[in-house]
Image: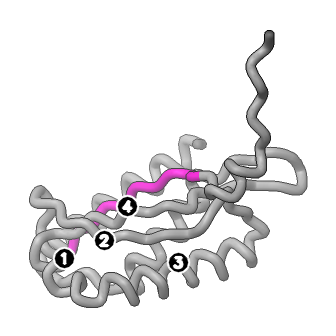
Amino acid sequence: MGVLKKFEQRLEGLVNGTFAKVFKSEVQPVEIAGALQRECDNNATIWNRDRTVVPNDFIVELSTPDFERLSPYSGQLGDELAGMVRDYAKQQRYTFMGTIKVHLEKADDLDTGLYRVRSRTLASSANQQATPERAPAG
C-alpha cells in the first residue's frame, strides 16, 4: 500500500473517529457499505492481468449500542451488503474465491458511531473439492 493511501486512511479514521465521538451519531448501513468497498480496494490482490482477487468474508465490528440496534436485521443487512459488494466488484472487475459473506459482531472497545471492518479471502468448498487430492506414493 502506498504512502499516500496510508495517509488517507489515517486521516479518514481521525476525522470519522473525532466526529463520531463529538456527535455520538449511530453507524448507518451506507457507512458500512462504503467501508466494505474500501476494504476490497485496499486488499485487492492482482493474480494476473485479467484477475484481481478481493476478500469475500467480512466482519463488521460495531459498538454495543450500534450492534444492538442493527443485530435484529443482521441476516437481511448482511445479504444486502454482500450484494452491494458483489455489484461494486463487478464494476471494478474484481473476482472472489468464494461466496461473499458479511457478518456483524459486537466490539466492546468501540464507542457509538465507530466501527471496524476485518476481511479475508476464503476459497469456496466447491473450489476446494475441485482440486484432486494426490494419492500417497508407494
Amino acid type assigned to the residue bearing label 4 in the image: Val
Q: Which mark is residue 82?
A: 3
Q: Earlier in the sequence, mark 2 or mark 1?
A: 1
Q: Crowdedness of circle 1 by 10 Å Cα count: few (<14), some, many (20+)?
A: many
Q: CA distance from mark 3 to mark 1?
A: 18 Å
Horizontally, is 30 left or right of 111 in the view?
right
Q: Crowdedness of circle 2 by 10 Å Cα count: few (<14), some, many (20+)?
A: some
Q: Which residue position is annotated with label 1?
A: 67
Q: Tell me what residue is drawn at x 29 percent, y 89 percent.
A: 73
Q: Earlier in the sequence, mark 3 or mark 4?
A: 3
Q: Please say if the residues under marks 3 and 1 sit with CB atoms less than 8 Å apart.
A: no
Q: Tell me what residue is drawn at x 19 percent, y 74 percent.
A: 20
Q: Which residue position is annotated with label 4?
A: 117
Q: What stretch of residues is rendered in magenta? A: 113-122
SS assignment for the magenta stretch, majority: strand
Q: CA distance from mark 3 to mark 2?
A: 12 Å
Q: Please say if the residues under marks 1 and 4 sit with CB atoms less than 8 Å apart.
A: no
List x then y, in percent, for residue 52. 76, 55
